[in-house]
Image (cartoon, grey):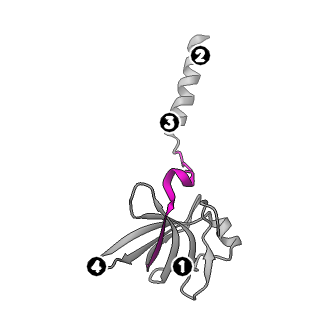
Amino acid sequence: MKRKSLIVLAAVVAVLLGTPVIAHHSFDAEFDRTKPVTLKGSVTKVEWGNPHIWIFIDVKDESGTVSNWGVEGGAPNALFREGWRKDSVKFGDTVTVQGSRAKDGSLRANAMKVTLPDGRTVFAGSSGGGR
């Protein structure tokens, strides 16, 4: 009986270890709401997927150096309820993002608001609170 239980346990562990895990992080684990950032740049890539969308933009600093930032938005369903569509932001569009910087200092941010190419400012579904 013990042998059968061990085989079942080993099978369960093997399945769990072989299954990819998609981790959903908390805002406070990744981003710092005390470090607001405003980014204006050209969209280089947009990834629509759960649990969050990502917009990548080329941002030019004061010295003219261009850096590519990854900006996390809300869940697709939440953004659709806010008026977003998959074509709201496209490659080459110029957008302005207001949000919070990554805690680790990397070129990532969590978006609070995005000013779209048509001039509309939309809530970006940030889990950091506020509008």
- The earlier-in-sequence mark between 1 and 2 is 2
Is residue 117 found left or right of 129 in the rendered image? left
Question: Which quarter shows the C terminus?
Answer: bottom right
**Picture coordinates of residue 76, whole percent (x, y):** 63, 66
Q: Is residue 58 magenta?
A: no
Q: CA distance from mark 1 to mark 3?
A: 37 Å
Q: Image point 51% across, 75% down: which residue?
A: 97
The residue that mark 1 highlights is 89
Q: State the SS at label 3.
A: helix
The magenta-colored residue range is 21-41
Q: State the SS at label 1.
A: loop
Q: State the SS at label 2.
A: helix
Q: CA distance from mark 1 to mark 2?
A: 55 Å
**Picture coordinates of residue 54, whole percent (x, y):** 51, 66
Q: CA distance from mark 1 to mark 4?
A: 27 Å
The residue that mark 4 highlights is 63
Q: Quadrant of residue 108?
A: bottom left
The amino acid beneath tag 3 is: Leu
Q: State the SS at label 4.
A: loop
Question: Which quarter shows the N terminus?
Answer: top right
- Comparing marks 3 and 4, which lies closer to the viewer? 4
- The earlier-in-sequence mark between 1 and 4 is 4
